[in-house]
Amino acid sequence: MTDPADRLREVADAASRAFSLLPARPEDLVEPPAGRSAAHRLRTDPDTVERDLVRLVLTIVELLRQLMERQALRRVDEGGLTEEQEERLGLTLMVLHDRMAELCDRYGLTLEDLNLDLGPLGPLLPPP
């Protein structure tokens, strides 16, 4: 079985190689067609690519966790669950939240760090 740290390093190396294909200087960028704005250039740092990748993965997991939580609350509000099911669901969601906090701590992140700014669309995750 492959060590997860080795696999993560492989992914980080692949990402680093992919990003190295981007122009190194702004003057190397090809001018966009008339009427279109230039895309923002990605900046990567080999020292932080692993942490950035973990941040992206944890952001997706946190988004899914919050969606599951909303779905669970909707089901509880509709009254379609027994009291035992509601209790299990609540405990499961609390454990998921705790695990997310532990993973964030492990990589030096906070849950607020996972809330990506989507520009004009606003933040990815709703306020707590």
Image (cartoon, helix red, strand yellow):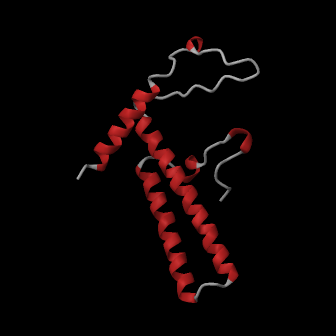
Asked whether 18 or 5 is in front, the reply is 18
For the point 47% across and 40% down, which residue is it?
A: 52
* Residue extending farthest left: 1
Task: State whether residue 66 is above or below residue 104.
Answer: below
* Residue extending farthest top: 27
Q: Position of residue 107 (x, y in %)?
A: 42, 47
* Residue extending farthest front: 33
Q: Position of residue 87 (x, y in %)?
A: 54, 82
* Residue extending farthest right: 35
Q: Quadrant of the C terminus?
A: bottom right
Task: State whether residue 80 is above or below residue 96.
Answer: below
Task: State whether residue 125 is above or below residue 46.
Answer: below
Residue 41 is left or right of residue 15, and the answer is right
Q: Position of residue 30 (x, y in %)?
A: 60, 15
Q: Quadrant of residue 116?
A: top right
For the point 59% across and 11% down, which residue is it?
A: 27
For the point 48% across and 58% down, which residue is it?
A: 101
Q: Position of residue 10 (x, y in %)?
A: 33, 38
For the point 50% across and 80% down, which residue is it?
A: 88
